[in-house]
Image (cartoon, rainbow, N blue to C red):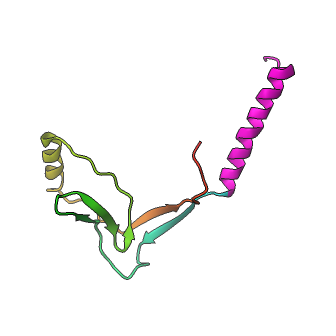
Amino acid sequence: MAAAPTGREGRMKIRQLVSYLMMWLDKRKQKEEISVYGHNKTIHGTTHLDIELDKEGNVVAVWFRCMPLPFRQHSTNDERAEQMRLMYREPVPLLVAVELIKMNTNVKEF
């Protein structure tokens, strides 16, 4: 087993470790809240996502029932687009709920 660093180098490593530990503890205090939206707890009973487009075909919103969901829009090539169209010819699972994480806005990733 290697000896622990001593002197100035050791103190700096300990300070860095304590700093990381304090950030970790602070993040744990501000832990995200996880909840389930849907599953017979809403007035709507849809089992799909609603996607709203502007006139140019850009996604402006993605909803599950009345809950706005985060999304990332990107273009794909023709081959991938055809694969996705074929995928939807088969039945896909119904969406009944989504799991949401409401993060404290003060939490910073590190």
Q: Residue at x 41, y 73 (%)?
A: 39
The quarter of the picture where residue 67 lies is bottom left
24 with respect to 103 (left or right): right
Residue 34 % position (x, y): 54, 63
Q: Residue at x 69, y 45 (%)?
A: 23
Q: Residue at x 14, y 52 (%)?
A: 85
Depth order, front residue of 84/53: 53
Position of the N terminus by quadrant? top right
The quarter of the picture where residue 80 lies is top left
The quarter of the picture where residue 47 lies is bottom left
Position of the C terminus by quadrant? top right
Q: Is residue 42 above or below residue 95?
A: below
Residue closest to the far bottom:
43
Q: Is residue 39 above or below residue 3?
A: below
- Give the number of marks: 0
Depth order, front residue of 96/23: 23
60 with respect to 32 (left or right): left
Residue 108 % position (x, y): 59, 49
Q: Is residue 23 magenta?
A: yes
Range shown magenta: 1-29
11 with respect to 102 (left or right): right
Residue closest to the far right:
7
Residue 87 in sight here: yes
| Main SS, magenta residues | helix
Residue 12 % position (x, y): 79, 27
Depth order, front residue of 68/42: 68
Residue 82 % position (x, y): 12, 46
76 with respect to 38 (left or right): left
Residue 93 in sight here: no
Residue closest to the far front:
55
Q: Is residue 109 magenta?
A: no
Q: Is residue 8 above or below residue 33?
A: above
